[in-house]
Amino acid sequence: LITVKHKSPLYFKINSELFTLTYGALVTQLCKDYENDEEVNKQLDKMGYNIGVRLIEDFLARSSVGRCQDFRETADVIAKVAFKTYLGVTPSVTNWSPAGDEFSLILESNPLVDFVELPDNHNALIYSNLLCGVLRGALEMVQMAVDVKFVQDTLRGDNVTEIRMKFIKRIEENLPAGDE
Amino acid sequence: MADDALFEFLHMEIVAHVYRDLQFIKGETDNKDRASRVSILEGMGYRVGQGLIERLTRDSPCFKDELDVMKFICKDFWTKVFRRQVDNLRTNHQGTYVLQDNKFNLLTQLSNGKQYLDQAPKYLAFSCGVVRGALSNLGLESVVTAEVSIMPSCKFQVVIQKL
């Protein structure tokens, strides 16, 4: 369903292939199991969320990054530490909203889509949508509610891949009833 | 790069998804239902195994015999996929191989010992497929199964199909 093309050895990254190939197999399977692209996108987001809420612990253990003071710092940590650690790429952080509550991550190359081509009948598929869920789930665990979505995608013919992140609100930590 | 962790998280979520989100036809027996879910995971692993072996052996010379292939699987391939080498390889020299991995990395998160033993097959199905897919691209059709008696140690049984 989703064809896999070879690229030259220059793009050959040994370690990331297991993840990339597995991810491709997952998307292919979801396209079989669900009727339309919107359903697949939703499922990818949900699975990403489930991964994100656990991945954050792994990340915090690995990186010993402290609490971010503001959303700008969060953006930097996501781009320069998290993406670098897990995907080996460092997106640039740009297009800040005037209020400082929205920014874009720009990826020149998206490691998830190495060797992937979308067939014609999947125009609404957001192939890498898992990433949106991961970011949303991870940030929720550090008390931030965010909205994350792809606005550009090299798989769909855009020049770059752009993820837009918007800060919604701070999530109050839930204290058990009776605590002061 | 810590994408090994990312793969492990993805694998766990894929297993969870197959058991949580897929609805099968009502009235199917538990056994049939379980077999379907396992085969979905195994099928995904198969495709991944095929893809991985292509990249890994692109510049390698041909293997001289079946045993050579199995040794490659136990060393280079296992290291690439499961981050360590197989601890022990046994064969009856008639097409059956048993690969023992004492610290299988997709089981280490589950438990040490006997807890969750009944859950282990779910977490091995994908890997069996990966091995079967790799062998298939190397020209060997096989049946691959895995068994666990004490986690995280497990044994993969590979039976090469003679055509």
Image (cartoon, grey):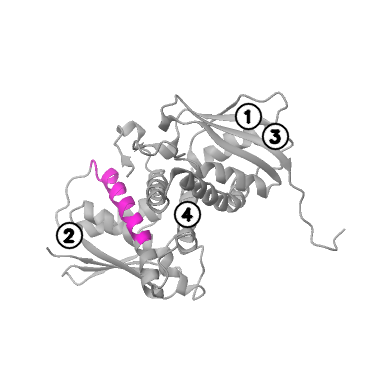
Query: Disc 1 or disc 4, which is closer to the eye?
Result: 1
On the rendered structure, is A29 left or right of B144? Answer: right
Instruction: In the displayed orientation, state which residue is furthest to the right.
Output: A180
Q: Residues within 10 Å of mark 3 (few under 14, many from 20)?
A: some
Residue type (three-letter) at the residue carrying disc 4: Glu
Viewer-nearest residue: A35 or B134: A35
Q: Chain of mark 1?
A: A
User: Where residue B88 appears, x then y in whole percent?
Assistant: 32, 67
Viewer-nearest residue: A172 or B148: A172
Q: Which residue is mark 1?
A: A103
**Does the magenta portion include B46?**
yes
Do discs 3 and 1 belong to a common subunit?
yes
Q: How many marks?
A: 4
Query: Disc 2 or disc 4, which is closer to the eye?
Result: 4
Q: Which residues are drawn in magenta?
A: B40-59
User: Where residue A46 appears, x then y in whole percent?
Assistant: 54, 50
Q: Are marks 1 and 4 in contact (CB under 8 Å)?
A: no
Viewer-nearest residue: B160 or A120: A120
Q: Which residue is mark 3?
A: A71
Residue type (three-letter) at the residue carrying disc 3: Phe
Q: Using the rendered image of the protein, determine whether residue B42 is visible from the camera's viewpoint.
A: yes
Q: Residues within 10 Å of mark 4 (few under 14, many from 20)?
A: some
Q: Which residue is mark 2?
A: B66
Query: Mark 2 to mark 4: distance in Å?
Result: 30 Å
On the rendered structure, is B37 left or right of B132? Answer: right
Q: Are marks 2 and 1 in contact (CB under 8 Å)?
A: no
Q: Are marks 3 and 1 in contact (CB under 8 Å)?
A: yes
Do discs 2 and 4 belong to a common subunit?
yes
Q: Residue at x 59, y 47 (%)?
A: A59
Q: Chain of mark 2?
A: B
Q: Residues within 10 Å of mark 2 (few under 14, many from 20)?
A: some
